[in-house]
Image: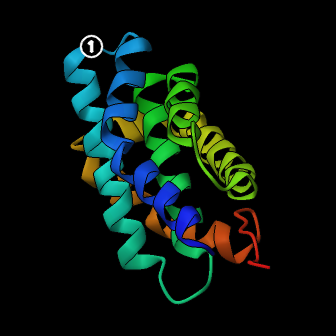
Amino acid sequence: MGLSDVAQQAIHAATGVPRLSAAALRAGLGPAGALEVLRISQASLQAAATHGRGEPGRTNAVRHFLWQAVLTARFGVEAARAIAAAQEQGTPNHRDSRVDEHNNEEGQQYGLAHAEELRAGPPAAAVASLVPVALAKWESDDLVWIRRR
């Protein structure tokens, strides 16, 4: 990976909050909804970093599943898809984006099927309740990752 690739990844990561917030607003969630999207995103990042480490790709796969399941349950699948698309916008790694789309879809399906329980309580609690589900999906190969060349 060259310096240009590293710079592109850093720029993409640094612009995540404005992209997600703007996508939430465009999806009609309003300022409070946009803040909730950021809280769900943060809780998903933290839970995946804590519980997903140790195997290549697991942290990223778990994060996308957790994130999209809770977003879908709380805001609907169309809003979750719009926010996911905003996250992938401008990414320098298109192979990774295809994998993220698969894991997002897994989360969206779960969020639709379990919306009632995932809407209850604060975002971090909803995310935390999904960690065992995400890890089981990882173990059963429902969540995927890409191998670096």
User: Would you place residue 16 above or below residue 95 in this image?
Assistant: above
Give the SS element for disc 1. helix
Instruction: Give whichever of 1, 141 is nearer the camera.
Output: 1
**Res. 134 image quadrant:** bottom right
Instruction: Give whichever of 140, 22 is nearer the camera.
Output: 22
User: Would you place residue 68 above or below residue 81 in this image?
Assistant: below
Tag 1 residue: 30
How is the structure coloured here? Answer: rainbow
Instruction: Give whichever of 100, 121 is nearer the camera.
Output: 100
Residue 69, how many percent across, how many down?
51, 43
Residue 93, how many percent across, how many down?
67, 56
**Res. 40 image quadrant:** top left
Q: Which amino acid does label 1 sit on?
A: Gly
User: Would you place residue 56 above or below residue 123 in this image?
Assistant: below
**Res. 5 image quadrant:** bottom right
User: Which residue is at 72% across, 51% downward?
Assistant: 94
User: Which residue is at 57% across, 36% downward?
Assistant: 89
102 left or right of 74?
A: right
112 left or right of 10?
A: right
User: Which residue is at 66% across, 66% downward?
Assistant: 137
